[in-house]
Amino acid sequence: MAATRPSFKVAGRTGFGSRTARRLRRDGIVPGVVYTGGEAARPFQADAHDLALFIGEGHALFDLEIEGEGKVPVVIKEEQRHPVRGDLVHIDCQEVDLEQEIQADVAIELRGAEDAPGVKEGGILEHVTREITIAALPTDIPDEGLTVDVSEMTIGDTIQLDAVTPPAGVKFVTDAPEEVTVATLNPPRVVEEEEPEVEEETELVGEAEEGAEEAAAEDGGGEGDSGSEG
């Protein structure tokens, strides 16, 4: 986690409802809400372009400052995106206590795939689990997610979650990490060549020979008739 938390400033929001939300989105504004335990949720709005850039930087924890109010530490609770374009259309944030452990979903990235002996031999690396739930203090949640080294994998190898060492202060939220497959390296796919359709070819040859015999028989019969008439 970064030593200094980034900060993002937003404006307060008073309008509600789907019609208001659509108008905001047409104007390049994303509506959002910040939730605080035991208190009323606070709506806000942010410039869509600026918010997209900020989220794209991958901050696990940041300070949200609603204009006219103080900063509060938050994590992203949910992102709602357009089903076709993928644009961010709504964001929910959760205010957190920096001294209280929380759960969060973080991405799992694979590192060193191009160096894995099994990959060099033509094996196929399958990234099975791409996200895992962790428990940690908000300040210990890794911005960049988790990275698993697969550079030593050979064909047939499997990496389970229990073989992955989490960062300091982080715990995996699962009762059976040995049953969570992170990655496997499978043998190369065998491409089977199509065998020639022998039966069909034999049938065509047989038809051709039969046709030739019939033609020969017709020719021979014609010559015999002509001779008897003479």
Image (cartoon, rainbow, N blue to C red):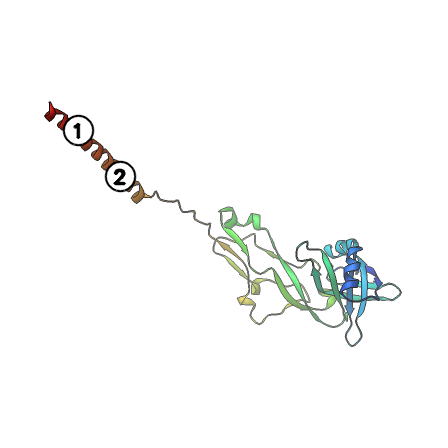
When the figure is inspected, residue 112 is found, relative to residue 221, above or below; the finding is: below
Residue 104 in the image: state x and y as whole percent: 68, 66
Residue 73 in the image: state x and y as whole percent: 79, 66
On the question of residue 62 being in view, the answer is no
Disc 2 marks a residue whose amino acid type is: Glu
On the question of residue 109 being in view, the answer is yes
- Nearest the eye: 161 or 20: 20
Q: Of the numbered discs in the image, which one, if any, rests on residue 115? A: none
Residue 74 in the image: state x and y as whole percent: 77, 66
Residue at far top of view: 230
Mark 1 in CB contact with mark 2 (< 8 angstroms): no
Q: Which residue is mark 1?
A: 222
Q: Which residue is mark 2?
A: 207
Is residue 20 rendered to the left or right of residue 183?
right
Quarter residue 229 falls in: top left
At 84% from the left and 63% from the top, the residue drawn is 65
Mark 1 or 2, closer to the camera: 1
Residue 97 in the image: state x and y as whole percent: 77, 71
- Nearest the eye: 126 or 167: 126
Give the quarter of the figure containing the C terminus: top left
Is residue 27 rendered to the left or right of residue 150?
right
Local secondary structure at mark 1: helix
Give the quarter of the figure containing the N terminus: bottom right
When the figure is inspected, residue 95 is found, relative to residue 126, above or below; the finding is: below
Label 1: few (<14), some or many (≥20) within 10 Å?
Answer: few
